[in-house]
Image: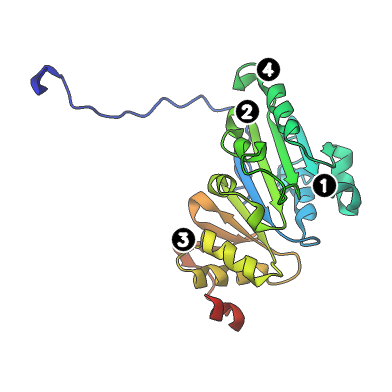
Amino acid sequence: MDESTFISTPKVLPVQSEPPDKRILPVHPNIPQPPALLLGIGAVKSGKTTLINNMLLRPREEGFFGQEYFDNVNIISNTILNDPTARFLRKAFDVQDYYTDGMITKLIDTQKSYGEKKDMPFIALLLDDILGSNMKRNNEVSFLATRYRHHNIGLMGVFTQNFKSVDTILRNNATDVIIFKQTNNKQLIQIAEEFHPSFGDIKTFLQIYHKAVEGKYNFLYIKVQEGKALKNFEEVIYEDGKMLGGEVDIPDELEDSI
């Protein structure tokens, strides 16, 4: 068979998209757009639980998801029973205060029991402070990070104090990243080394970070696929390859460690 036998040259065509899920309602462009994998990095009392409260309980007209957005919300946190700011979450959603890999298996099996994705409940899964040094690298959280969309998980959130505990699979699949104020400069540099390529060099990333976290409980929010950074969910501070509002200084000790 020679080249003249074929009626055209091979051209790769896009696969026809699935029809949009009508349950995925529009949300404010400054928050994660479902389906999303959100990675949050912050120490105790950095504002993680306050953020989750706002995202899931504040109404949609105020720019958040609202309590009725997802058919079900599952929260797994080793510290949630000791956190008074989590009392509203405990009342509103399905909450567990410990983690085993079997929980993820059970959740996936429950979703699969409905059949096709279009028939599965549209859910959220929030995992807080469960990534430990004793967790296997091939744990089910990391596996789910590559397949959460297939199980109609509209929002998968993984929050951790220790960036080193986040394996490569989770980092590579995160669509959105929230970085709370860091008390450990070594960890901050590790975070900068991971995420700076979307924003130029490490120094530029650290400037963006310091601009975002000025003031108590503020955080840097990164829309990974857009190369966009915000202070909280309110102010865009980096977009289209440039910092908005002028540059800021970074501490000398960070400058010296770059």
Per the image, label 3 sits on a secondary structure element best described as: helix
Local packing at callout 3 (Cα closer than 10 Å; few below 14, some 14-19, many 20+) is few
Question: Does 11 sit above or below residue 37?
Answer: above
Q: State how far apart marks 3 and 2 are (Cα).
A: 31 Å
Distance from the alpha carbon under mark 2 to that under mark 1: 24 Å
Q: CA distance from mark 1 to mark 4?
A: 29 Å
Circle 2 or circle 1, nearest the eye: 1
Which residue is labeled 3 in the image? 197
Q: Residue at 66% across / 43% down in the picture?
A: 136
Q: Viewer-nearest of labels 1 and 3? A: 1
**In this picture, residue 120 sits left or right of residue 18:** right
Q: Position of residue 239 (x, y in %)?
A: 49, 60
| Label 4 Cα neighbours within 10 Å, binned few <14 / some 14-19 / many ≥20 | few
Q: From the viewer's perspective, is 182 left or right of 96?
A: left
Q: Quadrant of residue 113?
A: top right
Q: Residue beneath label 2, please?
A: 151
Q: Position of residue 126 (x, y in %)?
A: 73, 42
Q: Are marks 1 and 4 in contact (CB under 8 Å)?
A: no
Looking at the image, residue 220 lies above or below residue 72: below
> Mark 1 or mark 4: which is in front?
1
Q: Residue at x 51, y 24 (%)?
A: 19
Q: Which residue position holds label 1?
A: 78
Residue with the mark numbered 4: 114
- Depicted 11 relative to depicted 196: above or below: above
Q: Earlier in the sequence, mark 1 or mark 3?
A: 1
Q: CA distance from mark 2 to mark 4?
A: 10 Å
